[in-house]
């Protein structure tokens, strides 16, 4: 259940464990995936940290190079490229 919750949350752009926990109350797809159980955000985060070494390479293999766990890093790189390429 936790793995399905994490994969679905990442695909929906939800990266915070607190937002994932809130989504199990608010969003129907998350309720279906968790079987109407509501894991605490600390449990979600603990699961993610415990299985991070196996989780990240598996997600990259599934989704290819387009998948980013931490989109903020990518946004900074895009801003730098845009600033470097601009003529003003």
Image: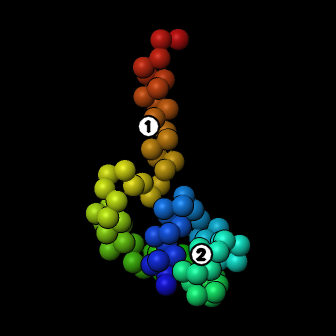
Going 50% across and 32% down the picture, which residue do you hit?
A: 79
| Percent of width and height locating residue 59 | 35, 65
Q: Earlier in the sequence, mark 1 or mark 2?
A: 2
Going 70% across and 77% down the picture, which residue do you hit?
A: 25
In terms of image quadrants, where is residue 55?
bottom left
- Check disc 2: other Cα within 10 Å, few if <14, some if 14-19, many if 20+: many
User: Considering the numbered disc 2 on the image, is that residue within a helix, a strand or a loop?
Assistant: helix
| Percent of width and height locating residue 63 | 34, 59
Q: Is residue 9 left or right of residue 52?
A: right
Q: Nearer the viewer, residue 45 or 62?
A: 62
In terms of image quadrants, where is residue 84?
top left
- Proximity of marks 1 and 2: CB atoms separated by less than 8 Å: no
User: What residue does disc 2 label?
Assistant: 30
What is the count of numbered marks?
Answer: 2
Q: Is residue 21 among what the camera can see?
A: no
User: From the viewer's perspective, is residue 61 above or below residue 48?
Assistant: above
Q: Is residue 54 among what the camera can see?
A: yes
Question: Marks 1 and 2, how far apart in space?
Answer: 31 Å
User: Considering the numbered disc 1 on the image, is that residue within a helix, a strand or a loop?
Assistant: helix
Question: Quick one: which residue is furthest to the top in this view?
Answer: 88
User: From the viewer's perspective, is residue 72 above or below residue 43?
Assistant: above
- Check disc 1: other Cα within 10 Å, few if <14, some if 14-19, many if 20+: few
| Percent of width and height locating residue 5 | 52, 76
Q: Is residue 76 left or right of residue 37?
A: left
Going 44% across and 58% down the picture, which residue do you hit?
A: 69
Going 53% across and 11% down the picture, which residue do you hit?
A: 88
**Looking at the image, is mark 1 or mark 2 nearer the viewer?**
2
Q: Nearer the viewer, residue 46 or 33?
A: 33
Disc on res. 77: 1
Question: Quick one: which residue is furthest to the right in this view?
Answer: 26
Disc on res. 43: none
Q: Nearer the viewer, residue 45 or 23?
A: 23
């Amino acid at each position: 259940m936790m793995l399905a919750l994490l994969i679905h949350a990442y695909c929906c752009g939800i990266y915070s464990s607190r937002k994932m926990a809130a989504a199990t109350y608010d969003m129907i797809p998350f309720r279906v995936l968790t079987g109407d159980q509501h894991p605490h955000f600390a449990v979600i985060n603990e699961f993610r940290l415990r299985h991070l070494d196996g989780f990240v390479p598996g997600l990259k293999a599934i989704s290819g190079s387009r998948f980013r766990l931490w989109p903020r890093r990518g946004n900074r790189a895009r801003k730098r490229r845009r600033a470097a390429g601009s003529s003003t």
